[in-house]
Amino acid sequence: MPGHRHVRCACFTFAVAAFAARCRVAATAPPVLSTPTPALVSQRAVERLPRSALLLFCAAYVLPGLFGRDPWRNADITAFGYMFSLAQGGADLLSPSIAGLPADGALLPYWLGALGIHLFGGLLDPALAARLPFALLLVGVLVFTWYGTYHLARTDNAQPLPFAFGGEASPVDYARAIADGALLALMATLGLLQLGHETTPELMQLFAAALFFYAMAASVSRRWASRGAVLLALPVLAASGAPAIGLGYALAGAVVCLRSSFPLARLFSLWIVGAAALASTIALAIGAWSWRLGTPDVSQVVQLLAWFAWPAWAMAGWTLWRWRGHLMHRHIAVPATAAAVALLACIGMGGSDRALMLALPPLAALAAFALPTLQRSVSAAIDWFSVAFFSIAAIAVWVVYAALQTGVPAKTASNVARLVPGYQSSFAWFPLLAAVAGTLAWLLLVRWRTGRHRPVLWKSLVLPAGGLSLCWLLAMTLLLPVLDYARSDRPLVERIAQHVPSDACIATVGLPRAQLAALEYHGGWRVETHPVPPQTGCEFLLTTARANAVTETLARPGWKLLARERRPTDRAEQTVVYRRDLASAGR
């Protein structure tokens, strides 16, 4: 019939038009992935983590440990010693020193700490003044990890599969959820906890590594911000004592960019080369080129990785498996190569935990991309393990605190007295109130997480990050006095001060730099260091000896043995104090 012919013609015309429109869309759309993404994420699963809660997480992680303590022994007090020497004007700007011993090539961190002391030393304790800019560096690590992961998650290859009838996550909300997960994964890693709160060059290296990770991630979406970031990141690495690691980042980053299908990424490789050349020049100018190679122990490296990067390494491994068809895409290649460079540096330096720390931001990004692929049973296992482990750890801290304050339980109190002899406990309201508030927040968090809520991506990492932040908060409030007593060199210096006047000159033989820095800072003495028994004008001499050394073997011609002192928690070594024997010198 004529009407039917008109209907058939109309349907045929509509089909031809739809086919032509589909061809035009296919011609302008990005190529279809050869391997489908393993992520299936609905819009309900990318509900935004409230910014106030995220900022509270970060504050609970960064602020504890910033106040109310001395620089702790070894790396922390050593680095602070160089900063304090610069701030006091006792060393040249290009060659900071402790007791006449020059520093390595990591000049920029020492300048930063000295600047903090110079600006705030009149108002704050010098140790706190030097610690403030490094706390800002830790904040920068968190910020650049979030933004770097966000830009990687915005790329097309990282997006989840579209649903047949719609309802999949929007690109922006999905990227935010993945970035929130990366930030929580970073705060949940065990290795960053103490090292991230020290005033050491490695924290500035970590900041530069996170900045380089951001530059690589944002190179195809934030052209000038990424270029400025890479021009800053690699020179900062070089000026912080890690130029070789910076060149490793440059090589890996240039390879990833040159293999990219994005024109901006391929162009970005030229900026990486320029930043590497600038970093090499700076390292040569300040004498930062030095090799700290060590013999790697495979079992030691495996054990270090197992606890230091937990739980990020486990989730990152799952990401590499589930996204194995996308290893060459940016959201996997960028963090994987950055983590590989830091891991190789750790192995080459004989299993250095401070080199492995540089791998934590990219490992956290990789861990976040495991979240869309985790089964609900795995997420539940993570939750219950976190609740059990961190609740037990928090209870243990409260028990130790009760034993310190009341002597109950008696066995715990006796154990603490045996481990930290001579410590006298004190009470303060503010640390107790902060600890109570943190514990209540943990209970509310557990109640919220175990309740019936829609499944969102970042929920699997809320309890690990919150539990670790709680334990750190409790340790840095309830147990900070006893930890400071055990980890600081102040008690040893106070014992030495019973034999050495405050205005004396001290010659030292064989003392580590950490102890030399403690003598200069806590004691205020003028300290000279000598490789052999000195011919010096100083009246007092300090050296080290084993705790079981016989007194007769410690005799030195021309010197009178005054005392043998040790740190309260060190039973292996003692500091031996001598005074010049004027009577024997006169004979």
Image (cartoon, grey):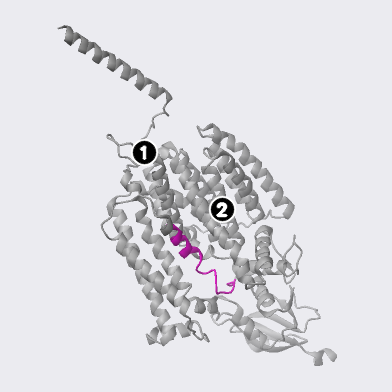
Is the residue 214 above or below the residue 95 in the image? above
Question: Residue at the spot x=45%, y=69% of the render?
Answer: 473
Q: Is residue 56 magenta?
A: yes
Position of 39 with respect to 351 (left or right) is: left
- In this view, the residue farthest toward the left is 1
Specify the quadrant of the image occupied by residue 358. Answer: bottom right
Q: Quadrant of the N terminus?
A: top left
Name the secondary structure under disc 2: helix
What is the x, y in percent for residue 398? 39, 77
Disc 1 marks which residue?
37
Instruction: Let me know if residue 189 appears in the view.
Output: no
Q: Nearer the viewer, mark 1 or mark 2?
A: 1
Is the residue 85 above or below the residue 425 in the image? above
As measured in the structure, the alpha-carbon distance from the residue carrying label 1 to the one carrying label 2 is 32 Å
Disc 2 marks which residue?
345
Magenta highlight range: 54-73
Depth order, front residue of 505/233: 233
Position of 351 with respect to 4 (left or right) is: right
Q: Residues within 10 Å of mark 2 (few under 14, many from 20)?
A: many
Closer to the chain start, of discs 1 and 2, is 1
